[in-house]
Image (spheres, rainbow, N blue to C red):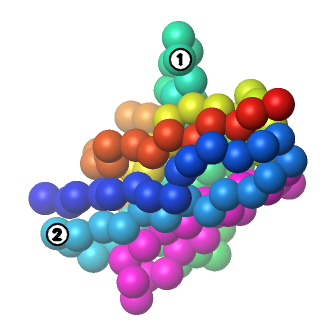
Amino acid sequence: QVQLVESGGGLVQAGGSLRLSCAASGRTLSSYAMGWFRQAPGKEREFVATISWSGGSTSYADSVKGRFTISRDNAKNTVYLEMNSLKPEDTAVYYCAKAKGFSGGPYYTMYDYWGQGTQVTVSS
């Protein structure tokens, strides 16, 4: 069993930055890809970013490319999402997720454990 706990969300003005963290317990994450998804009110959960087991490969949704950076520290069993140049449309609950294998992707079915989410609100 894996427990994922996100933190770092909050209220920020447009153009600001936040750094989300996802700490895992129950199993080491070093053999698995990890991902970040988000869900805005009234919308479906959407892919944000993924990082391979080693951290050597990353992929981003077009909407966040160039503004967000996913990273991981396997020694700390933690994954991060650095978010810069935030926009009001980035407002959502952000979830981290553990992939089923070494590499992740944009489909939620590729992930088997999810955190409870952390709220990010960007004011205009």
Residue 19 vertical placement versus 31 (above, below) = above
Provide residue 107's location: percent of width, then percent of height: 50, 35
- Tell me the SS state at disc 2: loop
Q: Looking at the picture, which amino acid does disc 1 mark?
A: Pro
Q: Position of residue 53 (x, y in %)?
A: 47, 71
> Which residue is at a point 13% across and 59% down the rendered structure image?
1
Identify the residue shown where x is 57% and y is 32%: 92
Q: Answer whether residue 86 is visible to the viewer in this image.
A: yes
Residue at coordinates 27% horizontally, 76% vertically from top-left? 28
Measured along the vertical axis of the image, is residue 8 above or below residue 77? Answer: above
On the image, numbered disc 2 is attached to which residue?
26
Residue 105, image x, y percentages: 55, 46
Locate residue 66: give its quadrant.
bottom right
Foreground residue among 101 and 35 = 35
Left or right of residue 13, residue 82 in this image: left
Image x and y of residue 20, in percent = 55, 59
How many marks the image carries: the answer is 2
| Residue 118 on the magenta segment | no
Q: Amino acid at mark 2?
A: Gly
Left or right of 75 in this view: 71? right
Q: Which label lies toward us, 1 or 2?
A: 1
Q: Nearer the viewer, residue 102 or 97?
A: 97
In this picture, residue 72 sits left or right of residue 89 = left
Indicate which disc, 1 or 2, sits on the residue closer to the N terminus.
2
Q: Is residue 122 above or below residue 44?
A: below
Q: Main secondary structure of the magenta part?
A: strand
Which segment is the magenta one?
66-85
Q: Which residue was labeled with disc 1?
A: 41
> Element type at marker 1?
loop
